[in-house]
Image (cartoon, helix red, strand yellow):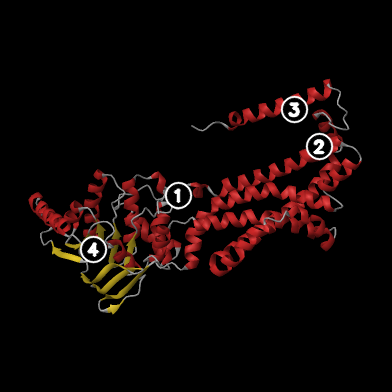
C-alpha cells in the first residue's frame, strides 16, 4: 500500500528537472542577457563562487527566523492556554486577533526598523507577528475537537479542568498544532527576509537587495534558492520531531460524539 | 444502597423526566429500559455528574442515606461511545480512572495488569485501541470501569456498538465478570433481549416525558431462566412499552 519515498518524489523531480532544462535551453538558444534572466547554470555557479558570503548571510537569516519562530510558538501556546481557560478573554481577544490578520504584517517591517533600529529585535518581532497566528488558531481548533464523551468520561472519574486539558485537549490538539507549525515555518524565513529588506547588516534579505542594486540577477536567484532551502530544512526538522515523538498521537480519533 | 429521591430533569421549559424515586441495591443488576429519547441516559449522566449543561435537574442522590455529590468515586460511569483514548495503550487506558483518582502511574499499573488475563486481554497491554477488535475494546473499557473499585457501575448502552454475535458473547462475559467482582449496576438499554437476559430487576420507562411505567424484579437466577420465561418477560415488556401512548 505504501509507496516508497523515491517513487513518490519521482514525478515532482522529473517536472522540476524538465522546468530547469527548459529554462537553461531558453537562455542558451534565445541569447537572453544574464543581467535579465540568468540560466540555472549561472545561478549555480554564482551560488558556488559566493558560497562563503551567502553562507554567512543565510546563517544570519536562519538564526533570526529560528529565534523568532521559537518565541512565537511559546507565545502562541501560552496564549492558547489562557484563551482556553478564560472564556471571556477568548470572546474578547480572539476577534481582535483575527482582525489583526487583515493588517499586511510585512508592510510593518519599515516601521519596526524605525521603532526598534537595525538589531535583532525588530526582525524577531516581525517573525513573531507573522507566525504567531497560525499556531494559535491550530491549537484552539484542536482543543475544540475533543469529543464530549471523552470529557464526560474523564469528568465522571473526577478530573478537574486541568486534567481534562492535559489528558484530552492537549493530545487531541497535537496533530493540529503540528499543521499550524508547518504553515508558520513556511512564513518564518519569508518574514525574516522581509524584515532584513527593511534594514539589516546581515542576512539574505539585505544580500538580495545589494545584489539587485548591482544588477546581479544570478546572485538574487542564488539567495532565493538558499532561502527556499532553509524553509525546507525547517519543515524537515518539524517533520522529524513529529515522527520521532508522536507516533501514538497519529492514531485516528474515530469517536462519534 | 444507592437511593435517588425525586429526581426530575428538564430541558429548558420541557420536562424530560417526571419526578422519580428509586432504590438500587448493592450487587444487583438493574436494567433501565425504554424508548429512545425518554431520558434514560440522562438519569445515568446525572448520577455520574456529567449532565449536559442544557439540562437542569432537581433531586437528591444518597449512598447509604448520606447525600452523594457527583462525580463520586463510589459510582463508575461508562459512556455509550467508545472512550478508549486512541493515543494511550490498553494498559494506560485501563489505568486512567485510577490515575485521576490520585494513584501514581506505577500503582495504577500494578492494579490493572493482573486483570488482563481474567478480562481476556493478555498480551494486549501495550496494544493501542485501534489494534483491537470491537469486543476486545469493550472488554478493555469494562476493565477500566471495574478496576476503579466503585460500588456501583453506571453503564450507558454498553453493547450498542457491537455486532449481534459479539453482543451476545459480551453479555454473558459481563455477567461472569460481575459474578467474580460483584457490583451494583444500573444499565441503560433499549434491547429487550439483553435486559431480560442480564437483569435482576427491570425498570421500564415511558416515552418522553419519562415516567417509571413498571418495576419488575426477576427473581429466577440467570442460569435457571428458561427460554419460555424469558419470552414471557419480553412479552410483558413489549406490551408495557407499546401500550404507553404518552
Callout 3–callout 1 Cβ contact below 8 Å? no
Q: How far separated are the C-alphas under marks 4 and 3?
A: 75 Å
Residue at x 59% of width, y 28% of height:
A7
Chain to which mark 2 belongs: A
Name of the residue lying farthest toward the right: A214
The chain under label 3 reads A
Residue at the (81%, 37%) spot, across then down:
A222
> Residue A186 vs residue A216: left or right?
left
Q: Which mark is residue A253?
A: 1
Sequence-wise, the earlier of marks 2 and 3 is: 3
Secondary structure category for the residue under label 4: loop
Q: How crowded is mark 2: few (under 14 residues within 10 Å), some or many (20 or more)?
A: many
Name the residue: 19% across, 63% down: B203
| Up/down of A53 relative to A152, above or below | above
Q: Do the residues labelled 2 and 4 touch (CB within 8 Å)?
A: no
Which residue, given by chain and number where applicable, does mark 2 sit on? A221
Residue on which the image places disc 4: B182
Which quarter of the picture shows residue B99? bottom left
Q: Is mark 3 on a helix, strand or loop?
A: helix
* Image spot of residue A106 (x, y percent): 75, 53
> In screen coordinates, is A1 left or right of A47?
left
Specify whether residue A86 is in view.
no
Image location (x, y in percent) of residue B103: 42, 66
Percent position (x, y) of residue A169? 50, 59
Amino acid at each position: 500500500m505504501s509507496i516508497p519515498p523515491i517513487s513518490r518524489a519521482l514525478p515532482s523531480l522529473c517536472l522540476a528537472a524538465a522546468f530547469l532544462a527548459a529554462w537553461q535551453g531558453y537562455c542558451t538558444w534565445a541569447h537572453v542577457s544574464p543581467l535579465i534572466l540568468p540560466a540555472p547554470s549561472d545561478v549555480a555557479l554564482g551560488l558556488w563562487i559566493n558560497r562563503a558570503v551567502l553562507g554567512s548571510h543565510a546563517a544570519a537569516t536562519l538564526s533570526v527566523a529560528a529565534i523568532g519562530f521559537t518565541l512565537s510558538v511559546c507565545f502562541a501556546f501560552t496564549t492558547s492556554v489562557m484563551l482556553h481557560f478564560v472564556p471571556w478573554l477568548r470572546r474578547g481577544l480572539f476577534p481582535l486577533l483575527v482582525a489583526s490578520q487583515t493588517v499586511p504584517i510585512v508592510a510593518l517591517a519599515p516601521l519596526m526598523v524605525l521603532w526598534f533600529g537595525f538589531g535583532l529585535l525588530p526582525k524577531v518581532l516581525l517573525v513573531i507577528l507573522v507566525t504567531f497566528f497560525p499556531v494559535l488558531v491550530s491549537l484552539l481548533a484542536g482543543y475544540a475537537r475533543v469529543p464530549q464523551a471523552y470529557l464526560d468520561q474523564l469528568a465522571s472519574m473526577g478530573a478537574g479542568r486541568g486534567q481534562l486539558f492535559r489528558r484530552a485537549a492537549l493530545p487531541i490538539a497535537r496533530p493540529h498544532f503540528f499543521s499550524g507549525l508547518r504553515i508558520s515555518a513556511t512564513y518564518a524565513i519569508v518574514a525574516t527576509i522581509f524584515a532584513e529588506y527593511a534594514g539589516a547588516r546581515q542576512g539574505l534579505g539585505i544580500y538580495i537587495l545589494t545584489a539587485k542594486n548591482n544588477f546581479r540577477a544570478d546572485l538574487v536567484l542564488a539567495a532565493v534558492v538558499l532561502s527556499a532551502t532553509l524553509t525546507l530544512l525547517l519543515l524537515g526538522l518539524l517533520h522529524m520531531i513529529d515522527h520521532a515523538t508522536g507516533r501514538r498521537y497519529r492514531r485516528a480519533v474515530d469517536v462519534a460524539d | 444502597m444507592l437511593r435517588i429521591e425525586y429526581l426530575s430533569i428538564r430541558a429548558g421549559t420541557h420536562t424530560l423526566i417526571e419526578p422519580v424515586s428509586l432504590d438500587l441495591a448493592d450487587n444487583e443488576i438493574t436494567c433501565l429500559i425504554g424508548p429512545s429519547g425518554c431520558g434514560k441516559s440522562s438519569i445515568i449522566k446525572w448520577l455520574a455528574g456529567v449532565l449536559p449543561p442544557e439540562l437542569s435537574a432537581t433531586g437528591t442522590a444518597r449512598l447509604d442515606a448520606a447525600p452523594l455529590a457527583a462525580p463520586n468515586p463510589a459510582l463508575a460511569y461508562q459512556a455509550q461511545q467508545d472512550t478508549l483514548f486512541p493515543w494511550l495503550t490498553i494498559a494506560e487506558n485501563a489505568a486512567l480512572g485510577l490515575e485521576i483518582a490520585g494513584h501514581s502511574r506505577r500503582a495504577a499499573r500494578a492494579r490493572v495488569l493482573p486483570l488482563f488475563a481474567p478480562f481476556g486481554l493478555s498480551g494486549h497491554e501495550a496494544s493501542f485501541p485501534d489494534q483491537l477488535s470491537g469486543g476486545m475494546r469493550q472488554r478493555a473499557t469494562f476493565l477500566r470501569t471495574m478496576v476503579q473499585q466503585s460500588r456501583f457501575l453506571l453503564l450507558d448502552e454498553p453493547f450498542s456498538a457491537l455486532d449481534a454475535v459479539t453482543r451476545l458473547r459480551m453479555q454473558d462475559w459481563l455477567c461472569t465478570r460481575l459474578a467474580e467482582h460483584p457490583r451494583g449496576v444500573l444499565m441503560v438499554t433499549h434491547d429487550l433481549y439483553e435486559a431480560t437476559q442480564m437483569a435482576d430487576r427491570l425498570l421500564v420507562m415511558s416515552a418522553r416525558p419519562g415516567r417509571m411505567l413498571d418495576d419488575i424484579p426477576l427473581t429466577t437466577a440467570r442460569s435457571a431462566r428458561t427460554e419460555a420465561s424469558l419470552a414471557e418477560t419480553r412479552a410483558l415488556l413489549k406490551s408495557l412499552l407499546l401500550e404507553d401512548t404518552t
